[in-house]
């Protein structure tokens, strides 16, 4: 019954803002077109608002769960038009606080004792209130000032109801609208569901904060508040209270004689450090979550809060992203296209030349601007939009990255309009790439992975045997794989390549072992020569190609 009432409210809001006028009726089945023509929405007067304003107002009327969906959609310009995205950016997650009695009861229940047994100066009036949680201030018995964040009661049920309705609408869009599948509405709702459910787990947020604090321990770039784990659990978080100047408060920053140029450049450095050094980045760095330490304004330091949304990249994604950015600024569009295919971001069957041409069409106009005006975020956005035309699979981690980069760029240029991101980022990227491919970096990488390789070493002979057995089966059983002369030639070349690759892998494994533990040479030297001889003969016979091939 509750879901039905909620659905009726959604239909009422659709009518109020005449969202039906935005529906591409001509692309829908005849039955649905007829229903829309006789729908009660026609009784409402036509709206004078733009389509972006209508959608934003409707989401605000539907409440905080839909507002957060709109905030996420505002970062997905690969899916929605720019005019709609601009309106959705204005959505604010402002919700009236729930009553203090409820909040005190939740805190006492989580503590397992009266509030006054743990906290002094507890403030029942919340410092801030949002859709998922609200925040109170207090002082520990040891004197430290803290904030207490608690989950809004009943929010799980509200989220569950609204998410199920979103799935229903998303499935209808994919089913009844020809272009609906291109927007992937079910995928968008699924990503949103994961994001908002993660925000319900305050212990997860605390763990994120703790990791980030460890990554930037004693750093002059950014300060992360301390988590008090003795009082933190999935529904309550206790964290050090910080005092700072909101990063968007330019007047106060200027009055404090803050070095805005240094502050803007440090923001870029923080971003690239998180992404490439740590592969763990704060993915919700909008101005409401960023403050500036008022001390040492000549060498300013950021302070971050709200760690519910974090991003991470695999080593492969890190490498491809860095190489993409470097290739982009070198205008090597063939390399950009090749990297997308090699990384698996677009299908292997993609024609490189066609993809390269599409990338050039998008990127060349960007370079007509002064270097200081070139936007990394816009580059990634346009690149992803282009790649989607070539069936690029959505990479959630890259979407988070692009959103965060846009926030950092917007913030940096608000602080210092002449900010040149490339001058700040280019040396960082080049140094990171050098460290990856230089001998010390390669040795370090080998040392990190060698214990795992040693553990898997007993499987190597069997894997080699399986590879050559498979190749032998194909070569001796033509019916198993019909082929032409050209396909057989390719297969033979592939066989030789696999043969060489297998032995290169074994050789590299041996070299890596020596690098990792040179003393192992002496241990091998102690093995009887007969064992080494017969082992060598066995491996040779195992790998020796059949003479009939």
Image (cartoon, rainbow, N blue to C red):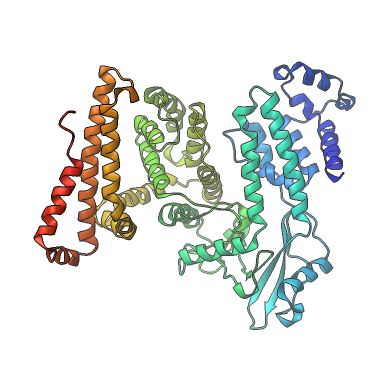
Q: Quadrant of the C terminus?
A: top left
Count up the numbered dots.
Answer: 0
Q: Position of residue 228 (x, y in %)?
A: 60, 73
Residue that extends furthest to the left in the rendered view of this protein = 529
Residue 65 higher or lower than 440, as above or below:
above
Relative placement, left or right, of 461 versus 399 is left
Q: Position of residue 53 (x, y in %)?
A: 74, 35
Relative placement, left or right, of 292 versus 150 is left
Q: Nearer the viewer, residue 92 or 529?
A: 529
Residue 301 visible here: no
Q: Quadrant of the N terminus?
A: top right
Residue 464, quarter of the rendered image: top left
Residue 137, quarter of the rendered image: bottom right
Residue 67, quarter of the rendered image: top right
Q: Nearer the viewer, residue 470 or 524?
A: 470
Query: Residue at left 37%, top 30%?
Result: 333
Residue 487 visible here: yes
Q: Position of residue 75 (x, y in %)?
A: 60, 41
Q: Nearer the viewer, residue 8 or 209?
A: 8
Q: Position of residue 161 (x, y in %)?
A: 77, 46
Query: Residue at left 47%, top 47%?
Result: 419
């Amino acid at each position: 019954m509750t879901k039905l009432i909620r659905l009726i409210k959604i239909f009422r809001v659709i009518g109020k803002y005449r969202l039906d006028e935005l529906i591409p009726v001509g692309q829908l089945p005849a039955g649905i077109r007829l229903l829309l023509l006789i729908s009660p929405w026609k009784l409402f007067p036509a709206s004078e608002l733009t389509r972006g304003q209508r959608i934003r107002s409707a989401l605000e009327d539907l409440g905080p769960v839909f507002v957060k969906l709109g905030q996420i959609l505002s970062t997905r310009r690969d899916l929605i038009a720019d005019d709609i995205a601009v309106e959705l950016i204005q959505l604010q997650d402002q919700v009236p606080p729930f009553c203090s009695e409820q909040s005190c009861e939740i805190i006492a229940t989580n503590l397992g004792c009266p509030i006054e047994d743990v906290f002094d100066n507890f403030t029942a009036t919340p410092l801030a209130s949002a859709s998922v949680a609200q925040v109170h201030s207090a002082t520990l018995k040891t004197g430290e000032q803290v904030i207490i964040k608690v989950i809004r009661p009943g929010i799980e049920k509200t989220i569950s109801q609204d998410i199920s309705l979103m799935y229903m609408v998303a499935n209808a869009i994919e089913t009844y609208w020809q272009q609906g599948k291109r927007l992937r509405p079910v995928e968008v709702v699924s990503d949103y569901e994961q994001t908002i459910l993660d925000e319900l787990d305050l212990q997860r947020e605390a763990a994120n904060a703790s990791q980030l604090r460890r990554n930037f321990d004693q750093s002059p770039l950014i300060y992360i508040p301390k988590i008090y784990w003795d009082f933190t659990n999935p529904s309550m978080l206790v964290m050090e209270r910080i005092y700072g100047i909101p990063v968007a408060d330019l007047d106060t920053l200027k009055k404090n004689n803050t070095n805005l140029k240094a502050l803007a450049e440090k923001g870029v450095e923080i971003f690239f450090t998180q992404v490439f050094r740590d592969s763990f980045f704060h993915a919700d760095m909008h101005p409401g979550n960023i403050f500036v330490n008022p001390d040492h304004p000549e060498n300013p330091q950021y302070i971050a809060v709200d760690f519910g949304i974090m991003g991470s990249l695999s080593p492969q994604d890190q490498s491809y992203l860095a190489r993409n950015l470097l290739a982009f600024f070198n205008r090597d569009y063939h390399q950009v296209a090749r990297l997308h295919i090699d990384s698996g971001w677009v299908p292997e069957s993609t024609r490189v030349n066609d993809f390269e041409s599409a990338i050039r069409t998008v990127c060349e106009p960007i370079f007509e601007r002064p270097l200081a005006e070139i936007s990394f975020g816009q580059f990634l956005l346009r690149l992803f939009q282009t790649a989607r035309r070539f069936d690029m699979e959505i990479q959630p981690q890259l979407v988070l990255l692009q959103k965060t980069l846009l926030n950092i760029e917007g913030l940096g240029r608000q602080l210092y309009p002449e900010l040149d991101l490339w001058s700040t980022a280019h040396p960082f990227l080049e140094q990171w790439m050098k460290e990856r491919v230089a001998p010390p970096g390669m040795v370090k990488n080998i040392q990190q992975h060698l214990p795992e390789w040693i553990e898997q070493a007993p499987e190597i002979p069997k894997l080699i045997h399986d590879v050559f057995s498979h190749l032998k089966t194909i070569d001796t059983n033509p019916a198993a794989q019909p082929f032409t002369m050209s396909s057989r030639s390719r297969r033979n070349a592939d066989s030789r390549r696999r043969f060489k690759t297998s032995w290169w892998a074994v050789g590299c494994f041996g070299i890596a072992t020596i690098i990792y533990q040179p003393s192992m040479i002496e241990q091998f030297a102690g093995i009887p020569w007969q064992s080494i001889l017969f082992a060598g003969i066995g491996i040779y016979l195992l790998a020796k190609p059949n003479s009939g091939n």
